[in-house]
Amino acid sequence: MVADALGVADVELLSSRAVVAPYDLEALTTGGRYRVFGRARHAGGESGWSIFVKVVRSWRLSPTFALVPEAHRESALAGFPFDSEPRVYRSDLANRLPTGLSMPRAHAVIDLDSESIALWLEEVPIVPARWDGPALARAARLLGRLAASPRVRPLATVADPDRRRTVRYYAEGRLAHQVVPALHDDRIWRHPLLAEVFDDALRRGLVTAAAELPAFVAELEAAPHGVAHGDAVPRNLLVAADRPELVLIDFGLWTCAPIGFDLGQLLIGEVQLGERSAAELPANERACVSSYVAGLRDEGCDVAEAVVRRVAAVQMLLFAALPAVPLELLDEEPTPARAALCRERAAGARFVLDLVAATARASGA
Protein backbone atom coordinates (compact mmCIF):
# COMPACT_ATOMS: atom_id res chain seq x y z
CA MET A 1 0.00 0.00 0.00
CA VAL A 2 2.85 2.39 0.78
CA ALA A 3 4.50 1.61 -2.53
CA ASP A 4 1.20 2.30 -4.28
CA ALA A 5 0.78 5.57 -2.39
CA LEU A 6 4.29 6.70 -3.42
CA GLY A 7 3.98 5.40 -6.96
CA VAL A 8 7.08 3.19 -6.76
CA ALA A 9 7.70 -0.52 -7.31
CA ASP A 10 8.89 -1.48 -3.84
CA VAL A 11 9.62 0.09 -0.45
CA GLU A 12 11.30 -0.59 2.86
CA LEU A 13 8.99 0.68 5.57
CA LEU A 14 10.99 2.81 8.01
CA SER A 15 8.22 4.06 10.27
CA SER A 16 4.47 4.27 10.64
CA ARG A 17 2.04 5.97 12.95
CA ALA A 18 -1.76 6.18 13.14
CA VAL A 19 -3.75 9.13 14.49
CA VAL A 20 -7.48 9.75 14.63
CA ALA A 21 -8.61 12.06 11.82
CA PRO A 22 -10.87 14.79 13.23
CA TYR A 23 -14.36 15.04 11.76
CA ASP A 24 -17.31 17.01 13.09
CA LEU A 25 -20.17 14.82 11.88
CA GLU A 26 -20.88 11.28 12.96
CA ALA A 27 -22.26 8.71 10.52
CA LEU A 28 -24.34 5.67 11.38
CA THR A 29 -21.99 3.16 9.77
CA THR A 30 -18.61 4.85 10.35
CA GLY A 31 -16.52 3.21 13.05
CA GLY A 32 -13.51 5.49 12.73
CA ARG A 33 -11.39 7.71 10.52
CA TYR A 34 -7.61 7.65 10.74
CA ARG A 35 -4.50 9.07 9.12
CA VAL A 36 -1.69 6.52 8.87
CA PHE A 37 1.68 7.98 7.91
CA GLY A 38 5.44 7.53 8.14
CA ARG A 39 8.58 7.25 6.05
CA ALA A 40 9.78 4.67 3.56
CA ARG A 41 12.99 3.95 1.63
CA HIS A 42 12.83 3.13 -2.07
CA ALA A 43 14.99 3.21 -5.18
CA GLY A 44 14.71 6.97 -5.41
CA GLY A 45 15.66 7.63 -1.78
CA GLU A 46 13.44 8.24 1.24
CA SER A 47 9.93 9.72 1.24
CA GLY A 48 7.15 10.51 3.63
CA TRP A 49 3.88 8.73 2.98
CA SER A 50 0.30 9.09 4.23
CA ILE A 51 -2.88 7.03 3.78
CA PHE A 52 -6.41 7.82 4.93
CA VAL A 53 -8.18 4.88 6.58
CA LYS A 54 -11.93 4.74 7.08
CA VAL A 55 -13.48 1.90 9.04
CA VAL A 56 -17.11 1.17 8.19
CA ARG A 57 -19.18 -1.14 10.36
CA SER A 58 -22.69 -2.42 10.82
CA TRP A 59 -25.06 0.15 12.25
CA ARG A 60 -25.84 -2.48 14.87
CA LEU A 61 -22.46 -1.71 16.48
CA SER A 62 -23.20 2.00 16.82
CA PRO A 63 -24.50 3.36 20.15
CA THR A 64 -27.31 5.10 18.26
CA PHE A 65 -28.76 1.74 17.22
CA ALA A 66 -30.05 1.27 20.77
CA LEU A 67 -32.50 4.11 20.08
CA VAL A 68 -34.19 2.13 17.29
CA PRO A 69 -37.36 0.37 18.52
CA GLU A 70 -36.93 -3.40 18.62
CA ALA A 71 -39.68 -3.97 16.06
CA HIS A 72 -37.91 -1.82 13.45
CA ARG A 73 -34.30 -2.94 13.91
CA GLU A 74 -34.21 -5.55 11.16
CA SER A 75 -35.65 -3.08 8.66
CA ALA A 76 -33.28 -0.36 9.84
CA LEU A 77 -30.23 -2.57 9.28
CA ALA A 78 -31.48 -3.56 5.83
CA GLY A 79 -31.77 0.09 4.83
CA PHE A 80 -28.22 0.95 5.86
CA PRO A 81 -25.95 -1.84 4.62
CA PHE A 82 -22.48 -1.07 5.95
CA ASP A 83 -20.76 -2.58 2.93
CA SER A 84 -22.22 -0.04 0.47
CA GLU A 85 -19.13 2.14 0.30
CA PRO A 86 -16.69 -0.79 0.13
CA ARG A 87 -18.69 -2.12 -2.84
CA VAL A 88 -18.11 1.19 -4.64
CA TYR A 89 -14.37 1.16 -3.96
CA ARG A 90 -14.12 -2.47 -5.09
CA SER A 91 -15.72 -1.51 -8.42
CA ASP A 92 -14.14 0.23 -11.41
CA LEU A 93 -16.12 3.45 -10.87
CA ALA A 94 -12.92 5.52 -10.86
CA ASN A 95 -12.39 4.60 -14.53
CA ARG A 96 -15.97 5.44 -15.49
CA LEU A 97 -16.54 8.87 -13.92
CA PRO A 98 -17.25 11.69 -16.36
CA THR A 99 -14.57 14.27 -17.09
CA GLY A 100 -14.41 16.73 -14.21
CA LEU A 101 -15.00 14.17 -11.45
CA SER A 102 -12.63 11.80 -9.70
CA MET A 103 -12.47 9.78 -6.48
CA PRO A 104 -9.70 8.72 -4.09
CA ARG A 105 -7.70 5.71 -5.20
CA ALA A 106 -8.31 2.68 -3.02
CA HIS A 107 -5.02 1.10 -1.96
CA ALA A 108 -6.91 -1.74 -0.27
CA VAL A 109 -10.37 -2.71 0.96
CA ILE A 110 -9.93 -5.14 3.85
CA ASP A 111 -12.59 -7.19 5.63
CA LEU A 112 -11.85 -6.90 9.36
CA ASP A 113 -14.66 -9.24 10.41
CA SER A 114 -18.23 -10.03 9.38
CA GLU A 115 -19.45 -6.56 10.39
CA SER A 116 -16.59 -4.17 9.65
CA ILE A 117 -14.36 -3.25 6.71
CA ALA A 118 -11.33 -0.96 6.46
CA LEU A 119 -10.92 1.31 3.45
CA TRP A 120 -7.26 2.27 2.87
CA LEU A 121 -7.59 5.31 0.61
CA GLU A 122 -5.44 7.86 -1.13
CA GLU A 123 -5.09 10.92 1.07
CA VAL A 124 -6.28 13.74 -1.18
CA PRO A 125 -4.58 17.10 -0.54
CA ILE A 126 -7.43 19.59 -0.35
CA VAL A 127 -7.53 23.36 -0.55
CA PRO A 128 -10.03 25.65 1.19
CA ALA A 129 -12.96 26.10 -1.16
CA ARG A 130 -15.39 28.99 -1.46
CA TRP A 131 -18.70 27.35 -2.28
CA ASP A 132 -20.35 30.37 -3.84
CA GLY A 133 -22.98 30.33 -6.60
CA PRO A 134 -20.58 29.61 -9.49
CA ALA A 135 -18.90 26.79 -7.55
CA LEU A 136 -22.25 25.19 -6.76
CA ALA A 137 -23.31 25.54 -10.41
CA ARG A 138 -20.11 23.82 -11.55
CA ALA A 139 -20.79 20.95 -9.15
CA ALA A 140 -24.40 20.75 -10.33
CA ARG A 141 -23.31 20.34 -13.95
CA LEU A 142 -20.94 17.53 -12.99
CA LEU A 143 -23.66 15.83 -10.95
CA GLY A 144 -25.93 16.06 -13.98
CA ARG A 145 -23.26 14.34 -16.06
CA LEU A 146 -22.91 11.70 -13.36
CA ALA A 147 -26.66 11.06 -13.32
CA ALA A 148 -26.87 10.47 -17.05
CA SER A 149 -23.47 8.98 -17.89
CA PRO A 150 -23.85 5.78 -19.95
CA ARG A 151 -20.47 4.59 -18.62
CA VAL A 152 -21.50 5.02 -14.98
CA ARG A 153 -25.03 3.63 -15.39
CA PRO A 154 -24.02 -0.07 -15.05
CA LEU A 155 -22.81 0.75 -11.51
CA ALA A 156 -25.99 2.54 -10.41
CA THR A 157 -26.87 -0.24 -7.96
CA VAL A 158 -23.36 -1.44 -7.09
CA ALA A 159 -23.67 -0.12 -3.51
CA ASP A 160 -27.15 -1.51 -2.94
CA PRO A 161 -27.72 -4.38 -5.37
CA ASP A 162 -30.95 -5.48 -3.70
CA ARG A 163 -32.42 -1.95 -4.01
CA ARG A 164 -33.32 -1.87 -0.33
CA ARG A 165 -32.48 1.78 0.24
CA THR A 166 -35.21 3.57 -1.72
CA VAL A 167 -37.26 6.72 -1.29
CA ARG A 168 -40.19 4.52 -0.27
CA TYR A 169 -38.09 2.80 2.39
CA TYR A 170 -37.10 6.20 3.79
CA ALA A 171 -40.67 7.53 3.71
CA GLU A 172 -42.20 4.44 5.30
CA GLY A 173 -39.38 4.27 7.83
CA ARG A 174 -37.93 7.43 9.29
CA LEU A 175 -40.61 9.82 8.02
CA ALA A 176 -43.58 7.66 9.01
CA HIS A 177 -42.28 6.54 12.40
CA GLN A 178 -40.35 9.58 13.61
CA VAL A 179 -40.89 12.75 11.59
CA VAL A 180 -44.63 12.72 10.86
CA PRO A 181 -45.65 11.92 14.47
CA ALA A 182 -43.46 14.81 15.63
CA LEU A 183 -45.28 17.20 13.29
CA HIS A 184 -48.52 16.36 15.13
CA ASP A 185 -47.03 16.75 18.63
CA ASP A 186 -48.13 20.10 20.08
CA ARG A 187 -45.47 19.95 22.80
CA ILE A 188 -42.67 20.09 20.24
CA TRP A 189 -43.95 23.28 18.67
CA ARG A 190 -43.99 25.03 22.05
CA HIS A 191 -40.28 24.40 22.54
CA PRO A 192 -38.33 27.69 22.98
CA LEU A 193 -36.15 26.91 19.95
CA LEU A 194 -39.16 26.43 17.68
CA ALA A 195 -42.04 28.56 18.93
CA GLU A 196 -41.06 31.77 17.13
CA VAL A 197 -39.43 30.54 13.92
CA PHE A 198 -41.73 27.61 13.10
CA ASP A 199 -44.94 29.64 13.05
CA ASP A 200 -48.47 28.31 12.60
CA ALA A 201 -48.45 28.81 8.84
CA LEU A 202 -45.24 26.85 8.41
CA ARG A 203 -46.45 24.07 10.69
CA ARG A 204 -49.73 23.79 8.73
CA GLY A 205 -47.79 23.66 5.48
CA LEU A 206 -45.59 20.83 6.74
CA VAL A 207 -48.52 18.86 8.15
CA THR A 208 -50.44 19.25 4.88
CA ALA A 209 -47.42 18.10 2.87
CA ALA A 210 -46.94 15.12 5.17
CA ALA A 211 -50.52 14.04 4.51
CA GLU A 212 -49.65 13.81 0.81
CA LEU A 213 -46.51 11.75 1.39
CA PRO A 214 -47.69 8.65 -0.54
CA ALA A 215 -48.36 10.78 -3.61
CA PHE A 216 -44.93 12.40 -3.43
CA VAL A 217 -43.24 9.01 -3.13
CA ALA A 218 -45.18 7.69 -6.11
CA GLU A 219 -44.23 10.77 -8.10
CA LEU A 220 -40.52 10.24 -7.47
CA GLU A 221 -40.80 6.54 -8.28
CA ALA A 222 -42.38 7.41 -11.64
CA ALA A 223 -39.71 9.97 -12.58
CA PRO A 224 -36.83 9.08 -14.93
CA HIS A 225 -33.98 7.52 -12.96
CA GLY A 226 -30.22 7.77 -13.18
CA VAL A 227 -27.15 7.54 -10.96
CA ALA A 228 -26.94 9.55 -7.74
CA HIS A 229 -24.13 10.05 -5.26
CA GLY A 230 -26.88 10.19 -2.65
CA ASP A 231 -25.23 12.71 -0.31
CA ALA A 232 -23.85 15.38 -2.59
CA VAL A 233 -23.23 18.07 0.02
CA PRO A 234 -20.19 20.27 -0.70
CA ARG A 235 -18.14 18.60 2.06
CA ASN A 236 -18.34 15.39 0.00
CA LEU A 237 -17.06 17.18 -3.12
CA LEU A 238 -13.42 17.92 -2.41
CA VAL A 239 -11.46 20.65 -4.18
CA ALA A 240 -8.02 19.08 -4.53
CA ALA A 241 -4.62 20.74 -4.68
CA ASP A 242 -3.21 18.20 -7.14
CA ARG A 243 -5.91 17.81 -9.81
CA PRO A 244 -8.55 19.90 -11.58
CA GLU A 245 -11.44 17.49 -10.93
CA LEU A 246 -13.82 17.59 -8.00
CA VAL A 247 -13.14 14.55 -5.85
CA LEU A 248 -16.19 12.56 -4.74
CA ILE A 249 -16.01 10.94 -1.30
CA ASP A 250 -18.43 9.17 1.08
CA PHE A 251 -20.24 6.71 -1.18
CA GLY A 252 -22.39 5.10 1.50
CA LEU A 253 -25.61 6.38 -0.07
CA TRP A 254 -24.65 5.82 -3.73
CA THR A 255 -27.81 4.74 -5.50
CA CYS A 256 -30.11 4.68 -8.49
CA ALA A 257 -32.46 7.64 -8.00
CA PRO A 258 -34.73 10.06 -9.86
CA ILE A 259 -32.77 12.39 -12.13
CA GLY A 260 -32.38 15.62 -10.17
CA PHE A 261 -32.09 13.87 -6.80
CA ASP A 262 -28.54 15.03 -6.02
CA LEU A 263 -29.53 18.67 -6.45
CA GLY A 264 -31.46 18.55 -3.18
CA GLN A 265 -28.46 17.87 -0.95
CA LEU A 266 -26.23 20.19 -2.97
CA LEU A 267 -28.66 23.06 -2.46
CA ILE A 268 -29.98 22.60 1.07
CA GLY A 269 -27.59 20.24 2.83
CA GLU A 270 -25.47 23.06 4.26
CA VAL A 271 -28.60 24.96 5.33
CA GLN A 272 -29.65 21.90 7.34
CA LEU A 273 -26.23 21.91 9.04
CA GLY A 274 -26.32 25.65 9.76
CA GLU A 275 -23.41 26.27 7.38
CA ARG A 276 -25.25 28.34 4.76
CA SER A 277 -28.04 30.90 4.87
CA ALA A 278 -31.40 29.89 3.45
CA ALA A 279 -31.50 33.33 1.82
CA GLU A 280 -29.15 31.95 -0.86
CA LEU A 281 -31.55 29.21 -1.89
CA PRO A 282 -33.61 31.02 -4.58
CA ALA A 283 -30.61 32.18 -6.64
CA ASN A 284 -28.68 28.94 -6.15
CA GLU A 285 -31.69 26.82 -7.10
CA ARG A 286 -32.16 28.62 -10.40
CA ALA A 287 -28.49 28.43 -11.32
CA CYS A 288 -27.95 24.85 -10.21
CA VAL A 289 -31.01 23.40 -11.94
CA SER A 290 -29.94 25.00 -15.23
CA SER A 291 -26.37 23.76 -14.81
CA TYR A 292 -27.51 20.25 -13.87
CA VAL A 293 -29.64 20.11 -17.03
CA ALA A 294 -26.61 21.25 -19.05
CA GLY A 295 -24.73 18.29 -17.55
CA LEU A 296 -27.53 15.96 -18.63
CA ARG A 297 -27.29 17.34 -22.15
CA ASP A 298 -23.51 16.77 -22.11
CA GLU A 299 -24.30 13.06 -21.73
CA GLY A 300 -27.07 13.02 -24.33
CA CYS A 301 -29.98 12.99 -21.85
CA ASP A 302 -33.09 14.98 -22.79
CA VAL A 303 -35.04 14.96 -19.49
CA ALA A 304 -36.86 18.29 -19.33
CA GLU A 305 -35.72 21.04 -16.98
CA ALA A 306 -39.20 21.21 -15.44
CA VAL A 307 -38.91 17.54 -14.46
CA VAL A 308 -35.50 18.09 -12.87
CA ARG A 309 -36.75 21.08 -10.90
CA ARG A 310 -39.78 19.13 -9.69
CA VAL A 311 -37.68 16.13 -8.59
CA ALA A 312 -35.28 18.41 -6.71
CA ALA A 313 -38.19 20.19 -5.02
CA VAL A 314 -39.85 16.96 -3.86
CA GLN A 315 -36.50 15.52 -2.77
CA MET A 316 -35.88 18.58 -0.59
CA LEU A 317 -39.39 18.29 0.82
CA LEU A 318 -38.91 14.69 1.93
CA PHE A 319 -35.28 14.88 3.05
CA ALA A 320 -35.03 18.44 4.40
CA ALA A 321 -38.32 20.33 4.85
CA LEU A 322 -40.44 17.66 6.55
CA PRO A 323 -37.56 16.74 8.91
CA ALA A 324 -36.52 20.39 9.36
CA VAL A 325 -37.23 20.33 13.09
CA PRO A 326 -33.93 19.31 14.75
CA LEU A 327 -35.43 16.76 17.12
CA GLU A 328 -31.96 15.86 18.38
CA LEU A 329 -31.59 19.37 19.88
CA LEU A 330 -34.86 19.58 21.74
CA ASP A 331 -33.42 18.04 24.92
CA GLU A 332 -30.51 20.49 24.84
CA GLU A 333 -30.23 23.93 26.40
CA PRO A 334 -31.31 26.68 23.96
CA THR A 335 -28.30 28.67 22.78
CA PRO A 336 -27.88 31.43 20.17
CA ALA A 337 -26.19 28.95 17.81
CA ARG A 338 -29.02 26.42 18.12
CA ALA A 339 -31.60 29.17 17.69
CA ALA A 340 -29.82 30.32 14.51
CA LEU A 341 -29.84 26.76 13.16
CA CYS A 342 -33.58 26.45 13.75
CA ARG A 343 -34.17 29.81 12.10
CA GLU A 344 -32.31 28.77 8.95
CA ARG A 345 -34.03 25.38 8.86
CA ALA A 346 -37.42 27.06 9.13
CA ALA A 347 -36.54 29.48 6.33
CA GLY A 348 -35.33 26.59 4.20
CA ALA A 349 -38.56 24.69 4.82
CA ARG A 350 -40.62 27.70 3.72
CA PHE A 351 -38.59 27.97 0.52
CA VAL A 352 -39.09 24.27 -0.23
CA LEU A 353 -42.84 24.36 0.40
CA ASP A 354 -43.14 27.32 -1.98
CA LEU A 355 -41.01 25.56 -4.59
CA VAL A 356 -43.08 22.37 -4.34
CA ALA A 357 -46.24 24.42 -4.88
CA ALA A 358 -44.74 26.32 -7.81
CA THR A 359 -43.42 23.19 -9.53
CA ALA A 360 -46.77 21.44 -9.03
CA ARG A 361 -48.53 24.27 -10.88
CA ALA A 362 -45.91 24.21 -13.65
CA SER A 363 -46.11 20.44 -14.13
CA GLY A 364 -49.76 19.92 -13.40
CA ALA A 365 -48.85 17.55 -10.56
Image (tube, helix red, strand yellow):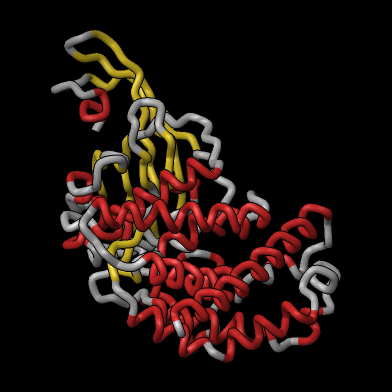
* Observer-nearest of 15 and 183: 183
> Furthest residue to the top?
45
Residue placed at 24% from the left, 67% from the top?
A: 157
Q: Please say whether residue 112 is visible from this viewpoint.
A: no
Using residue 290 as the reference point, say whether residue 343 is left or right of it.
right
On the image, the x and y values in percent for residue 207 come to: 66, 86
Q: Please say whether residue 311 is visible from this viewpoint.
A: yes
If the image is split into quadrants, where does the N terminus sit? top left
Residue placed at 24% from the left, 47% from the top?
A: 97
On the image, the x and y values in percent for residue 209 come to: 59, 84
On the image, the x and y values in percent for residue 263 come to: 45, 60
* Observer-nearest of 30 and 209: 209
Residue placed at 23% from the left, 71% from the top?
A: 161
* Observer-nearest of 337 and 284: 284
- Residue 229 location, quadrant: bottom left
- Residue 158 location, quadrant: bottom left
Q: How many marks?
A: 0
Rendered position, 216 above or below 328: below
On the image, the x and y values in percent for residue 44 come to: 20, 9
Using residue 223 as the reference point, say whether residue 202 is left or right of it.
right
Residue placed at 56% from the left, 41% from the top?
A: 132
